Image: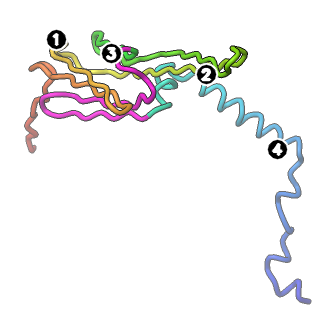
Amino acid sequence: MLKSLTPWKNQRDSGLMEVAPQDELAQFRANFDRMLSKMWSADLDDSWNNGWGCEVQDTEDEIVVRAEAPGFEPDEIDVKLSPGRLVMQAEHKTEHDTSENGNGHFSSYGKFYRSMSVPAGIEADNIEAIYKNGIVEVHLPKGEEAKAKRIAVKAQ
């Protein structure tokens, strides 16, 4: 009698119990394959850029790019401007002897890479790059071609 008064007891207890394990495994495999295919088909620049934080500030006169690159020295960082692209990269490898008798060895490896599109008209001769407290800051001054132009909107 109590079963008939509780509406959820008239239904089957759980739909999860009816699912065959091989169906769940097939769904898991399909999701995993989809994740891998997205990862391998992604742009390599995007996959490298996901590691550390990067901030872009676009003002009227310049574009300022700030990127986290902790653990590097200024002479290890390379900043290049090619047509339409800014590339910042650094790489270092350090090796240390950790024991008094020379048997211990410690090595570390670090790599930093950022790449982004920039508009045409950047004044390449006036670009300034600064490294301070683990942050690379690049100032890209805009020429007249790169500056925004206001476009009037007309009502009809």
Q: Secondary structure at mark 2?
A: helix
Q: Nearer the viewer, residue 103 or 70?
A: 103
Q: Is residue 49 above or below residue 93?
A: below
Which amino acid, mark 2?
Trp
Report the magenta residues as a range: 53-75
Is mark 3 in CB contact (under 8 Å) with mark 2? no
Of labels 2 and 4, earlier in sequence is 4
Residue visible at 12% across and 18% down in the picture: 145
Q: Is residue 96 left or right of residue 24?
A: left
Q: In the displayed structure, would residue 137 be above or below residue 83? A: below
Q: Position of residue 81 (x, y in %)?
A: 29, 13
The percent coordinates of residue 71 (x first, y second) are 45, 27
Residue 40's label in the rendered image is 2
Q: Which residue is mark 4?
A: 24
Which numbered disc covers residue 125? 1
Q: Is residue 39 toward the left or the right of residue 49 in the image?
A: right
- Outermost residue to the bottom: 1
Report the amino acid beneath label 4: Glu
Q: Is residue 6 left or right of residue 38?
A: right
Question: Would you identify the image quadrant in which residue 125 lies?
Answer: top left
- Is residue 65 a member of the stretch shown in magenta? yes
